[in-house]
Amino acid sequence: MGAPNHKDPAMGERLSEEILKLGITNGEIAARLGCHPPKVSDWACGRSIPYSWYLARLYELGCDVIYILVGERTRWQ
């Protein structure tokens, strides 16, 4: 099962913002998500989008997933 065949540069930029907010590298995110660093890089560059289970884990790590997906901050952010 491959990565979704979708591209979304804006989503990638928002994901990069959220990762920076956590203060950790793409490599550290990959390790915490159980995936390879190039996958995180593909998401951050907008070449592909993460599956829902990765988004759920990003939420657990402190990312605003609604912001990543649609570009609007949640009320509590």
Image (cartoon, helix red, strand yellow):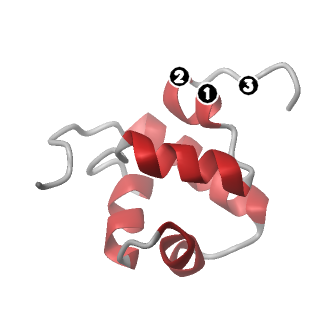
Q: Is residue 50 left or right of residue 13?
A: left
Q: Is residue 34 left or right of residue 29?
A: left
Separation (CA) of disc 2 from disc 3: 9 Å
Mark 1 and mark 3 residues within 8 Å of each other at the beta carbon: yes
Q: Residues within 10 Å of mark 1 (few under 14, many from 20)?
A: few
Ranked by sequence position, the earlier of labels 1 and 3 is 1
Dot 1 amino acid type: Ile
Mark 1 and mark 2 residues within 8 Å of each other at the beta carbon: yes
Helix, strand, or loop for circle 1? helix
Dot 3 amino acid type: Arg
Q: Position of residue 10 (x, y in %)?
A: 45, 36
The relative height of residue 69 versus residue 15 in the rendered view (above or below) is above
Q: Residue at x 35, y 44 (%)?
A: 51
Separation (CA) of disc 1 from disc 3: 7 Å
Mark 1 vs mark 3: give the one in front. Answer: 1
Q: Quadrant of the N terminus?
A: bottom left
Q: Quadrant of residue 22?
A: bottom right
Q: Residues within 10 Å of mark 3 (few under 14, many from 20)?
A: few
Q: Residue at x 74, y 51 (%)?
A: 62
Q: Quadrant of the C terminus?
A: top right
Residue highlighted by disc 1: 66
Residue highlighted by disc 2: 70
User: 54 or 38: nearer the eye?
Assistant: 54
Helix, strand, or loop for circle 2? helix
Residue highlighted by disc 3: 73
Q: Position of residue 68 (x, y in %)?
A: 56, 36
Q: Is residue 56 left or right of residue 45?
A: right
Mark 2 and mark 3 residues within 8 Å of each other at the beta carbon: no
Q: Quadrant of residue 72?
A: top right
